[in-house]
Image (cartoon, rainbow, N blue to C red):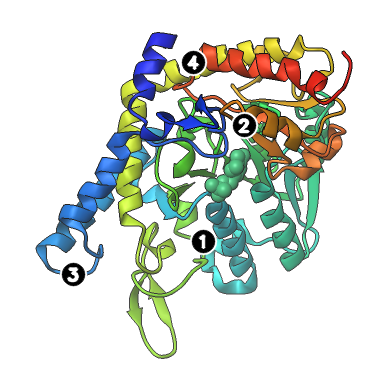
Amino acid sequence: IDDAEAARLAADFPALDQEVNGHRLAYLDSGATSQKPSAVLDAERDFYEHHNAAVHRGAHTLAALATERFEDARAKVAGFIGADIDEVVWTSGATEALNLIAYGISNASAGLGGEAAKRFAIGAGDVIVTTEGEHHANLIPWQELAARTGATLRVIPILDDATLDMEAAAALITPEVKLVAFTHVSNVSAVINPVSELVALARAADALVVLDACQSVPHMGVNVRELDVDFAAFSGHKMLGPTGIGVLYGRSELLNALPPFLTGGSMITTVTLEKAEYLPAPQRFEAGTQQVAQAIGLAAAIDYLDAVGLDRIHEREAELGARMYRGAAAIPGIRVLGPSEAALRSGVVALDVEGVHAHDVGQYLDDRGIAIRVGHHCAQPLHRRLGVTASTRISPYFYNTTAEIDAVIEALGEVRAYFGLAD
Ligand code: PMP
């Protein structure tokens, strides 16, 4: 993807075509949420205009059409990540998907899991492992699960360049470990974690593997079968899809053994006044009226991503990220977080401007129409470890141009002088 193609693709995204503070918007906050192409907006609108009905319930024609499109969307997601259809559970987002696993496991520990109890039984003496580089969504659910079950939480530390301390990982993932949860790609340091090495350590301990794929699925080809993880979670809104829809992938046999997190309508076979029998996965996890339009919008997003090509998207972002990294690292007083080796990084660049609070940096860039994210990006322990309380994060997507990256570099070069700091 070159600049000409990026500009052509950007024209598919209505929100990118606007002025902010008198400048053409340069949207570089796709790590938080991506913009949406017209194809996704049209798919949602088309659903509401022509097929809107509750799925898996009515016998009428619209209900059948809505159900068909909803299940087609599931099949599309499954194909996109190399899973079987019944291994894709709709959630409201990655946060809910990760909590679904954690609450399901504690229900299993409480004896409700039947056969599942073996794999999911976590209690005193057992260990859950996560890392210092996680988004809070892949840290707090495990803290809470440990607190509910009496298990211990161990945290794999990161090194100064934010890569995982793999020697420590090998020492921490002992036979008592029941679950290892880690992110595929960091939303701050850009680190791409060594999934296969971590999976091998977890397998040797017979532990479950949970992958936070929020920052990988939108940006590179991800095949859950090849990665050999047990569960994976990601959000639709970061991959051109609507808000309010996310995905939990789980191995079929594990999903069918995991107790549900939410109970109610649409997830049962038989209900008496005393008890209920649950449907198999994925329906057992989909209580209540589902986010049908959002699922259909996500399917349109996947069509769009497939048409552009995930490999080309990945390559383009690597180029934009490397350009951003080089430009920022060359500015006196700026420290880029994460590793310097390009092969270890995604396209995200988070940095610290010495002497200037990230919020002031964000304001300076916003005045120039540049949208980036500032703060701790829901990763306080990671920032603390790297010695900063907040950072400025530039997260490009394939629709960004090198001119936009250069505009950020130029503005960053001015920031310290603007706030009265000498080089
Ligand atoms: N994990 C990572 C790595 C993320 O970047 C995010 C979103 N910032 C999440 C989890 C949570 O995703 P959501 O807010 O869409 O549930």
Q: Position of residue 289 (x, y in %)?
A: 35, 66
**Alpha carbon separation for disc pair 1 and 4:** 45 Å
Mark 4 residue's CB less than 8 Å from ligand 1: no
Which of label 1 and label 4 is nearer to you?
4
Residue at the image position 60 percent from the left and 22 percent from the top:
346
**Alpha carbon separation for disc pair 4 and 3:** 47 Å
| Residue 366: mark | 2
Q: Quadrant of the N terminus?
A: top left
Three-letter code for the amino acid on which mark 3 is drawn: Gly
Q: Is residue 375 above or below residue 416?
A: below
Task: From the image, tell me which residue sits under label 4.
Answer: 401
Task: From the image, tell me which residue sits under label 3.
Answer: 58
Three-letter code for the amino acid on which mark 1 is drawn: Leu
Which quarter of the picture shows residue 160?
top right
| Residue 258: mark | 1
Q: Residues within 10 Å of mark 3 (few under 14, many from 20)?
A: few
Q: Secondary structure at mark 2?
A: helix
Which of label 4 and label 3 is nearer to you?
4
Three-letter code for the amino acid on which mark 2 is drawn: Asp
